[in-house]
Image: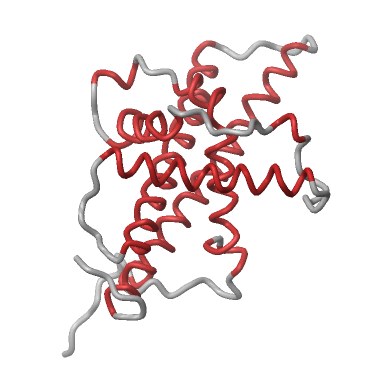
Amino acid sequence: MKIKSGDATDSAHANALKHEFLRCEDAFKDFETYATTMIMRAQAEDQGGASPSAEETRLIAYKTYNAYSRFIHHLYEFMLGAVARDRGDTASMEAAVKDTYIMSHTQRILTSRRQAILNGTAPAWENHISAYPEKVPPEFAEQFRRMRNKVSGHVTHERSTISLSDFYDEYHKYVYMLYHKCREHWSLLRDKEFPDLQEITKFSVLIKKGGP
């Protein structure tokens, strides 16, 4: 379907994008909560505290995995929704086109961060320049898409053998850069009140009583 800036379809698409990013933001907050619990338990154990049972260890890993995989899923879908709006067309894209968009957008953000650090305009919380290589790994977009498909999007036998931990270790900084950049415009923190997302925020399980 074609999208023209400012028309009804564009407005509806913007609502869907807002919803998708809020889901992404919710998932990331859940991930932060569970990941913090995982780290604190490990630190306590290192300091001589009681070791969690195997069942407790599996449970927190399960919850952390689920939150991170949801985060990846919603961020990836948000990015594709954004490029559809930019293109003015919701038609399906080939994987190579998706990868090209993800790579170019991530590279722009990475280059911008490096330049801000080098010219002294980066915020105080920013990392050292050594944290950011000059180029995004060439396989990043493909791996991002693969994780979205295998650990969250589709039920497949591969899910239990693909290491989301390895993906996190190798590529989380790039995923987070995308997320952080999107937050500048789409985060709930920018809104003075919770947005009206039409049927999304009209949803109700309350029984509507008819007339007498």
> Left of 39 or right of it: where is 166?
left
| Residue found at x 24% / y 48% | 93
Q: Where 209 falls versus 43 (above or below)?
A: below
Judging from the image, the colouring scheme is: secondary structure
Quarter of the image that includes the C terminus: bottom left
**Residue 42 at x, y percent in the picture:** 68, 17
**Residue 190 at x, y percent in the picture:** 61, 68
Pick the front one: 83 or 163: 83
**Residue 178 at x, y percent in the picture:** 53, 46
Q: Where 144 falls versus 118 (above or below)?
A: above
| Residue found at x 35% / y 64% | 85
Q: Where 35 falls versus 71 (above or below)?
A: above
> Left of 135 or right of it: where is 152?
left
| Residue found at x 37% / y 56% | 83
Pick the front one: 92 or 120: 120
| Residue found at x 24% / y 60% | 90
> Left of 45 or right of it: where is 27?
left
Pick the front one: 211 or 93: 93
Which quadrant holds residue 107?
A: top right
The tally of labels here is 0
Quarter of the image that includes the N terminus: bottom left
**Residue 27 at x, y percent in the picture:** 49, 45
> Left of 120 or right of it: where is 19?
left
Furthest residue in direction bottom, as rendered: 212
